[in-house]
Image (tube, rainbow, N blue to C red):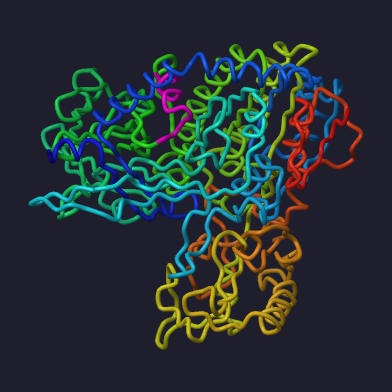
Amino acid sequence: MVLGILAWFLPVLFPFPVEAYIGPGAGIAFVSSFLLVIVSFALALFALLTWPFRWLYRTARFRRALGRSRIRRCIVLGFDGQDPELTDRFLAEGLLPNFQRLRDLGCYRRLRTSLPAESPVAWSSFQTGCNPGRHRVFDFLVPNRKNYLPELCSARVEPSSRQLKVGRYRIPLGRPLIRFERKSRSFWKVLSNYGIFSTVLRVPVTFPPEKFNGLLLSAMSVPDLRGTQGTFTYFTSDPEECTRVTGGMVVPVRLENGSAKARLTGPENLLRTTGEMLGIDLEVELPRNGSPAVLRLDNREFELPLGNYTPWIPLEFRAGLGTRVRGISRFLLRQTEPHLKLYMTPINISPGKPVLPISHPWSYALYLARTQGDFATLGLAEDTWALNERVIDEEDFLRQAYLIHDERERMFFDALDKTRHGLLVCVFDITDRLQHMFFRYLDGDHPSNRDKDTERHRDAIPEMYRRMDDLVGKVLERVDEDTVLFVMSDHGFKSFRRGVNLNSWLRGQGYLTLEDGSDGCEWFQGVDWARSKAYAVGLGGIYLNLRGREARGTVESGDQAESLKKEIRERLEALTDPADGSQPVSRVYDTREAYRGPYTSEGPDLIVGFKPGYRASWSSATGGITADIFEENTKSWSGDHCMNPADVPGVFFSNRKIEAGEVDIMDIGPTILDLFGVPVPDYCDGGALLPS
């Protein structure tokens, strides 16, 4: 009986904080493979029995929509972070002939981005045609108003609150809550209501996947198997590296008789009352007599080529009572002497045996895994933090990024070949990740250039733009007169030289107070909330410590709050950098003026629009308070876009001419709806660019 209950109700939450990218993990739940088999069989049986009725209904709806449609197919290529200034430069240099061809066929415009200019906010505005006051995604991170701690804005995974304790086991008696925090409706869901099929690949902020008439593979916010947004593992016999590396899991190993043994740590086993970590025995046998190194995981062996990534290696963690949790990782043997240095990517959820819903329908991820092999499922799959920590070098990062990009291209062209009618949207991340990590090669004065590995990657960004141009060329070859092609980015890029700790500034101005005897803190530890008026979370958001909203609020709504906001705005806009006297803040926005919609009051009270070169500091984003307000950015992460939106617009290309002088990211969804003859919902802030 217990085993039967366990097989059906086995949700577990893993709330690990991690510094990779910007913040803590979303948590993760796993179920046994037995449950997945049973559920998939039941769903397949139901689908088979109801298929004739659903086919008739959808066909009728599609034919009605088709009669109003002006196009047969729409393709949206998203290149996250493609910058218009760099695009203009490379167009002028003749590096982008296919972008030029697309521009000449139709149009090319700068694309007005969201406030703030962050990927989760911008792509949510793209999906819904709405401003953040209507879709409720305000930042990567927002504060939990009960404890002030940062948490992911777009998704939440919570465990079952009911548990049955049986000896050393604790058995959940309910299903986990996997909640999609973005509000409003995506335009592909609106299309679905009119019978138009869509395929949506890796658009940020699509986890957990929503149900609609189509296929979807989730992206940003999909956690790794440990429940974080991406935690690498580094096995090293170098004692100095054991204390130097942060932001990942460092495992010290000892070389003995040509091999090293360690424990590969997976997720926490919350089936056990002791809560120990699940793990796999790992052994590395060093090269002998010209043969490569060997990786042993339990009783399986894999070749470890020196300096090259392995293919995706399946990992299986046994939680007990027949429960197994499956993931995949790549390994990179960086060095064997004088020290062993072995890097392991974050443990991705296995797409062939997913423990969380990462696609719609659930079987779509399985289809991709069966037809194309394993692929990265982590929302932020390129391991930027491992490069920041020098656990991998620039060449390693480039190879990893292109391995992931090649997977995405295969998925996209598979979908393109199968999409004869309807919508296809695919977002490619490599444009964003490479500009984050290699922008210093475009900025000779960047502080991180003192530690550059080599000059041979100075062309990494131009080469990436050239490869995206090749991709556009391949798509243009498959576009006919009944197909509309949009190529777009969510924002642009600028150099990120200096970080501004907004919490340190608030403290210095008397708005945020620490407990007596404290000089600084992380995660708001040691803040005296009874004497604090404002605090900062995320990459530019400032929140008033509002009475009745925050757990220990001190500021009254109304005149007191409005006066405080005005005071903070004026002081921040007058802030100067002691390094050179420049002013880092372009504008501070009052969201009650900038946003419209029912969720406006849930967002930040103020948003700081930094000038190019500046951004909220790493520690400020997660509630850290440091002695200095300003800090040099010496990380490889040298480019950014979390700045004043007017300074980091995106790009918009179309194979159809448009008359509009300005294009907003909120216009794209309504434009596609209108092209398919579907009425644009009244709640949309954007409008159609190609009216009939």
Q: Quadrant of residue 309?
A: top left
Residue, x 22% and y 27% (percent of image)? 295
Q: Main secondary structure of the magenta part?
A: helix
Given residues 584 and 603, the one toward you in this image is 603
Residue 574 located left or right of residue 625 = right
Residue, x 72% and y 29% (percent of image)? 487
Residue 153 drawn above or below residue 99 = below
- Residue 392 on image: x %, y %: 42, 39
Residue 330 located left or right of residue 615 = left
- Residue 21 on image: x %, y %: 49, 49
Q: Quadrant of residue 127?
A: top right
Given residues 48 and 518, the one toward you in this image is 48
- Residue 237 on image: x %, y %: 23, 44
Residue 128 located left or right of residue 670 = left
Q: Quadrant of the N terminus?
A: top left
- Residue 432 on image: x %, y %: 60, 39
Given residues 234 and 580, the one toward you in this image is 234
Q: Is 526 in the magenta?
A: no
State the extent of the magenta-drawn residues as a range: 357-369
Q: Is 367 in the magenta?
A: yes
Residue 361 drawn above or below residue 152 = above
